[in-house]
């Protein structure tokens, strides 16, 4: 098999560019695109080490040095913690991409030399990899951003009823939930009724009027002794019953945007 150094060099730069761009998007580094290009060119130089008579241990340390230089070139040096975080995410994304390409290799029974796959010579699969790689990392970056944006609003919610019983639920802080008891201005937490039904059989219910975009309605509520979230106690809270299942991943209740300390 013929190996063209210039082709491998530019493919390596392409992959390094995609990796650095993914790190920038996930960590929100907001750097200029030319900085990422310069960083990827620094990374592309590492491909030349494969043609030098050096042992694997030396090659390993050289790659670490190159990764450090890539991150400093692309994202600048601010402090050691900032730089280490960039390097860690660079390697995490590299492992993800390497695993995906390894799976591609197995599925199509290609031979490989590093990230270069071939079958009867260097074939069209290089184009396939170049197309597939941004798609893989796009979905990875999207999911990571969703994790940062959404899962940071997940809380463990311990609800204590007047019956002295308590239940631990998964809660989500929804900025759209501003429901307030119009009589005493108490925040309302919306709870999946099926989760707490056996705890509220003998509780006195309150009927609280509320309005939404479509109409005005009445919500069945109860007053609880307290709600504990992240070791902080909230009293004077109402639980509003939601008969329909809350359609959020693993969520049992919707926290109120007016609960101080959560926003």
Image (tube, rainbow, N blue to C red):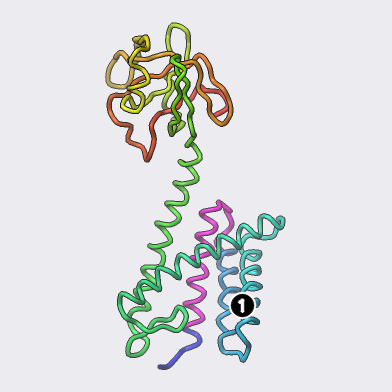
Which quadrant of the figure has residue 73? Answer: bottom right
In the image, the segment drawn in magenta is 8-34
For the residue pair 141 and 238, the one nearer the viewer reads as 238
What x and y, as percent, mark residue 222? 39, 14
In the rendered image, which quarter contains the C terminus?
top right
For the residue carrying disc 1, how many other residues have a C-alpha within 10 Å: few (<14), some (14-19), or many (20+)?
few
Tell whether 38 sits left or right of 224. Answer: right
Q: Main secondary structure of the magenta part?
A: helix
* Residue 78 in magenta stretch: no
Tell whether 251 sits left or right of 65. Answer: left
Tell whether 55 sits left or right of 94. Answer: right
Is residue 94 in view from this perspective? yes
What x and y, as percent, mark residue 257? 48, 25
Work out whether 128 lies above or below 178. Answer: below
Work out whether 4 lies above or below 43. Answer: below
Identify the residue under disc 1: 60
């Amino acid at each position: 098999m013929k190996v063209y150094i210039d082709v491998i060099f530019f493919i390596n730069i392409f992959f390094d560019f995609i990796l650095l761009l993914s790190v920038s998007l996930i960590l929100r580094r907001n750097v200029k695109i030319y900085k990422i290009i310069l960083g990827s060119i620094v990374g592309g130089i590492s491909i030349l080490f494969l043609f030098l008579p050096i042992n694997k241990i030396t090659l390993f340390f050289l790659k670490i040095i190159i990764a450090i230089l890539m991150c400093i070139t692309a994202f600048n040096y601010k402090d050691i913690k900032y730089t280490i975080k960039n390097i860690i995410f660079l390697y995490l994304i590299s492992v993800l991409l390497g695993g995906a390409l390894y799976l591609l290799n197995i599925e199509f029974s290609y031979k490989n030399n590093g990230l270069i796959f071939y079958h009867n010579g260097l074939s069209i699969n290089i184009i396939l990899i170049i197309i597939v790689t941004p798609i893989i990392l796009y979905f990875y970056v999207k999911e990571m951003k969703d994790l940062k944006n959404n899962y940071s609003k997940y809380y463990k919610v311990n609800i204590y009823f007047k019956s002295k019983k308590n239940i631990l639920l998964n809660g989500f802080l929804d900025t759209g939930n501003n429901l307030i008891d119009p009589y005493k201005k108490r925040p309302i937490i919306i709870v999946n009724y099926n989760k707490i039904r056996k705890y509220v059989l003998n509780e006195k219910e309150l009927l609280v009027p509320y309005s939404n975009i479509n109409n005005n309605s009445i919500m069945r509520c109860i007053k609880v002794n307290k709600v504990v979230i992240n070791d902080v106690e909230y009293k004077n809270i109402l639980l509003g019953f939601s008969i329909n299942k809350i359609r959020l991943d693993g969520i049992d209740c919707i926290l109120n945007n007016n609960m101080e300390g959560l926003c």
